Amino acid sequence: MRKNNPQATKELLLQAAAKVILERGANNLTLEAVASTAKISKGGLLHHFPTKEVLLTGLVQQLIGVFVYCIEKELASEPKKSGRWTRAYIRATFNPSPDEKHLTTALASIISAYPVLLDALETSFAFAEKNILADGLKPARATAIRLACDGLWFSELTGMITLPEPLRSELLEELIAWTKNA
């Protein structure tokens, strides 16, 4: 069945890579370990991901895709007026999906060792900045909101700080309010 569905095979391999990182640590991520976890030959893995960097880039792209999906889901419930994209970005940041949390946790321990992964994240941040600046808010306010969200995400990614409740919820509400008081 997987032979007929290359996308399903790629997904399986990405899940296996995240599982290896989470269970064994980033230092034990090898192509052999991923292939074994996915129950696919190493040659099969190499067909889809010829190097470890390509595999890790795939994980980052999957993380970005999950986040974009969360934004789109939030946009569906937003009225079509100023600040809607920014509110969706805020809510997607503060309420990550389980898949996003899983991928973020897996990537946190390896992202600094592979600078190429930062390129994919940089593209994602540029996409967010472009959309937020086109959202009808004052540019400085829109950028401050994005930086607050990105700072929260990065702090949680690295484990530097996790905001306790109720502060986290209060910050969410404050940022949402900033999008309505343009």
Image (cartoon, rainbow, N blue to C red):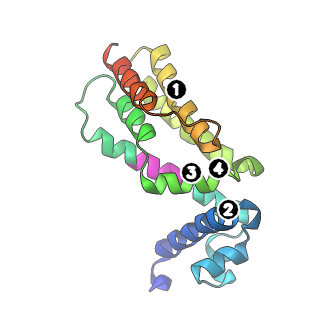
Q: Which residue is mark 2?
A: 54
Q: Mark 3 touching mark 4, by CB under 8 A?
A: yes
Q: Amino acid at mark 3?
A: Thr
**Disc 2 to disc 4, how far (Cα)?**
17 Å
**Mark sitting earlier along the chain (1/4):** 4
Looking at the image, can residue 8 be seen? yes
Query: Split into 4 quadrants, where in the image is the N terminus?
Result: bottom left
**Mark sitting earlier along the chain (2/4):** 2
The circle on residue 135 is none
Residue 28 vertical position relative to residue 132 in the rendered view, above or below = below
Residue 66 is one of the magenta-drawn residues: yes
Magenta span: 63-69
List x then y, in percent, for residue 125.
55, 36
The circle on residue 148 is 1
**Disc 3 to disc 4, how far (Cα)?**
6 Å
Q: Which residue is mark 4?
A: 108
**Disc 2 to disc 1, how far (Cα)?**
30 Å
Say few, some or many: other residues with alpha carbon within 10 Å of mark 2 (under 14 / 14 to 19 / 20 or more). Answer: some
Q: Amino acid at mark 1?
A: Ala
In the image, taking residue 75 as reference, residue 54 lies left or right, namely: right
Q: Which residue is mark 3?
A: 104
Tell me which corner region of the image, top left, top right, bottom left or bottom right, holds residue 131. top left
List x then y, in percent, for residue 134.
41, 25
SS type, badge 4: helix
Say few, some or many: other residues with alpha carbon within 10 Å of mark 4 (under 14 / 14 to 19 / 20 or more). Answer: some
